Image: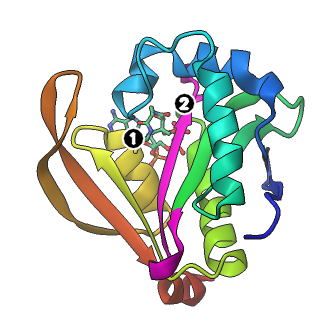
């Protein structure tokens, strides 16, 4: 896989994670509201972010993942995370993302997702990118709709989160659909 690059958008710089991001990851990912839409550990304890960043570096070297710290171009503030978990043999990847609570509802996730779809389809030559969200996470569904992904259906009670079975809403996009749009 190519070196983990940085991606620029109008307001964001998506860059590789650094160990120095760990305290900010812990602080922002530690909010229950952020954890509720994801499989982030909760509570998010000291040392977990350092471990996760090291795991991401290894996964990138092994070609199974690419992840980006989402930062504001203006002042380099760290605001969240976005990444692809890749299965090379199928040329597909699962997209996942989260933003710190103070940064919600300003269009940042949509902007970051657009950049990562572009990178995944045009640079990594992926055939398909998909993204599931927990049923009830309307904001995430809206992001995936805004970037033009197709709703593919519901996986009923697919996971356990916080002790309860949760449905997954699945969205996907094919490479040819991305290129047709752009
Ligand atoms: C999901 C998440 C990444 C969205 O980030 P964001 O930067 O706020 O997203 P955007 O601002 O780009 O778009 C959010 C859209 O959802 C809409 N929205 C927000 N809350 C909503 C709600 N409760 N019901 C319906 N729509 C909602 C917003 O109005 C906006 O749509 P619009 O542009 O048409 O008005 C963010 O809420 C988050 O990090 N949540 C916790 C982690 C998570 O759930 N990650 C996704 C896992 S699949």
Which residue bears the numbered disc 2?
Answer: 104
Q: CA distance from mark 2 to mark 1?
A: 9 Å
Ligand 1 neighbours mark 1 (CB distance < 8 Å): yes
Give x and y (percent) for residue 180: 55, 90
Ligand 1 neighbours mark 2 (CB distance < 8 Å): yes
Whether residue 159 appears in magenta in the rendering, the answer is no
Q: Residue at x 69, y 36 (%)?
A: 54
Q: Residue at x 89, y 35 (%)?
A: 74
Quadrant in which residue 79 is drawn? top right
Quadrant in which ligand 1 is drawn: top left
Whether residue 87 appears in magenta in the rendering, the answer is yes
Which residue bears the numbered disc 1?
Answer: 139
- Mark 1 lies on a secondary structure that is helix
**Magenta-drawn segment:** 86-104
**Can residue 134 be seen in this snapshot?**
yes
Task: Report the coloring of the rendering.
Answer: rainbow
Q: Which of the pair 182/49 is nearer the observer?
A: 49
What is the crowding at mark 1: few (fewer than 14 residues within 10 Å), some, or many (at least 20)?
some
- Mark 2 lies on a secondary structure that is loop
Is 140 placed above or below 42 here? below
Cβ atoms at labels 2 and 1 below 8 Å apart: yes
Q: Quadrant of the N terminus?
A: bottom right
């Amino acid at each position: 896989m190519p070196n983990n690059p940085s991606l620029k958008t109008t307001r964001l710089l998506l860059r590789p994670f650094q160990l120095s991001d760990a305290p900010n990851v812990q602080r922002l990912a530690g909010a229950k509201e952020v954890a509720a839409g994801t499989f982030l550990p909760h509570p998010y304890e000291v040392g977990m972010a350092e471990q996760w960043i090291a795991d991401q570096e290894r996964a990138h070297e092994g070609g199974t993942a690419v992840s980006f710290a989402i930062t504001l171009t203006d002042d380099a503030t760290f605001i969240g995370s976005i990444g692809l978990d890749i299965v090379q043999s199928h040329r597909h990847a699962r997209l996942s993302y989260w933003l710190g609570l103070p940064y919600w509802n300003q269009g940042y996730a949509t902007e970051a997702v657009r950049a990562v779809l572009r990178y995944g389809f045009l640079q990594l030559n992926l055939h398909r990118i998909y993204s599931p969200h927990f049923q009830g996470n309307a904001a995430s569904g809206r992001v995936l709709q805004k970037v033009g992904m197709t709703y593919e259906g519901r996986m009923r009670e697919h996971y356990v989160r916080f002790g309860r079975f949760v449905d997954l809403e699945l969205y996907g996009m094919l490479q040819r659909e991305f290129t047709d749009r752009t």
